[in-house]
Image (spheres, grey):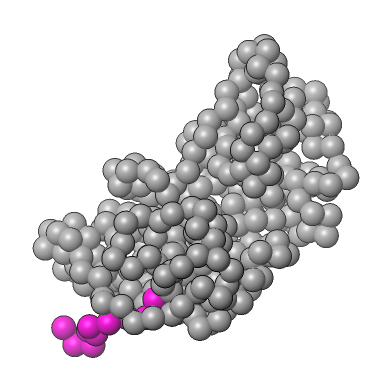
Amino acid sequence: MAGLRCVMRAVVLNSYGDEGVLEILEVPDPDPGPDEVVVRVAATAMNRADLLQRMGLYPGPPMEHEIPGLEFAGVVERVGSRVDPSRIGSEVMGIVAGGAHAELVVTHERTLIDIPTGIALTDAAAIPEVFITAFDALVVQGGLASGGTALVHAGASGVGTASIQIARAIGARVVVSASASKLDKLLALGATAAVDRRAGDFVEVCRSVTDGAGVDVVLDVVGGDYVQRNIDALALGGRIIQVGVMGGGRTEINVGELLRKRASITGTTLRARPIEEKIAISRRFAMEMVPWFTVGALRPVIDRRYEFDDIAEAHRYMATNESTGKILIDI
């Protein structure tokens, strides 16, 4: 095929540690399996998992070369033997378990999501991981619906800014916690209420917003001592969806209150799911959420962009926790 190269450039982890271990090397182009495609990556994005993987704390899937990166936007360049050749040239985005911080990425054809009308190809890299995570946690597993209320921690993160928009689009309210300097931005994005994570009381705010009833769903990336307070903030029959433990994985909770409220806590990640589950959530997201991008109700929130060769700077910036929304890497 014209233009096909034998090698591509990719971020490769040959050791673990600080940003100095990040290397951009030439490695062999990936080959698609029968049901897979190879996508020429236009842009990818940073996620907290990339920092943890770099430090050796969150291993990626088995690969000939360990390449981080959980999402991408690009153009289909090659297809497997069972994939319709007409997919070549399609502008797509999607999630992968690893390998997206590279010029080419291979993935199952059914996980591909067409770029929404009106969204630039390179901006679309800010959508897949965080919007699918938020949709899955709030709507699919949490059951959030029109008229409901959610509590979302780390509201200025990629998942947080996606959650605000999804809740607003489906007619739900959302309370978010975040750093004080970011609260006004989150209210402008559509949050019903925004709480200073250091000085505020998100339990009291949730009760106030819901006239004492409590919230229907909590999306939490913090864990630690937030878990008991999340239970306190819940309504009867409420659900806590735990998608991270930035504040620690161990804590004490009052199980009696969990029982009294007939509530539940569910732990979840996207990365470790079987391919069948990733296909299912990608297809449902494409059907139920992508149309909201087309009409402008949802949009990628982009904080900064970096060139591929500046990947170490992107890691350093993400570690400061100063961003609101996504950090993109233009390939």
Magenta residues (range)? 1-10
Between 251 and 317, which is closer to the camera in this rendering?
251
Relative placement, left or right, of 69 versus 261 is left
User: On screen, 324 above or below 307?
Assistant: above
Q: Is residue 52 magenta?
A: no
Picture residue at 27% right of the left edge, 82% below the top: 7
- Residue 219 placed where, x, y %? 62, 39
Between 110 and 322, which is closer to the camera in this rendering?
322
- Residue 134 placed where, x, y %? 54, 46
> Magenta region's main secondary structure?
loop
Between 22 and 244, which is closer to the camera in this rendering?
22
Q: Quadrant of residue 116?
A: bottom left
- Residue 238 placed where, x, y %? 62, 24
Between 100 and 25, which is closer to the camera in this rendering?
25
The C terminus sits in image quarter: bottom left
User: On screen, 301 above or below 259?
Assistant: below
- Residue 163 placed where, x, y %? 61, 48
Q: Is residue 121 visible?
A: no
Picture residue at 75% right of the left edge, 30% below the top: 229
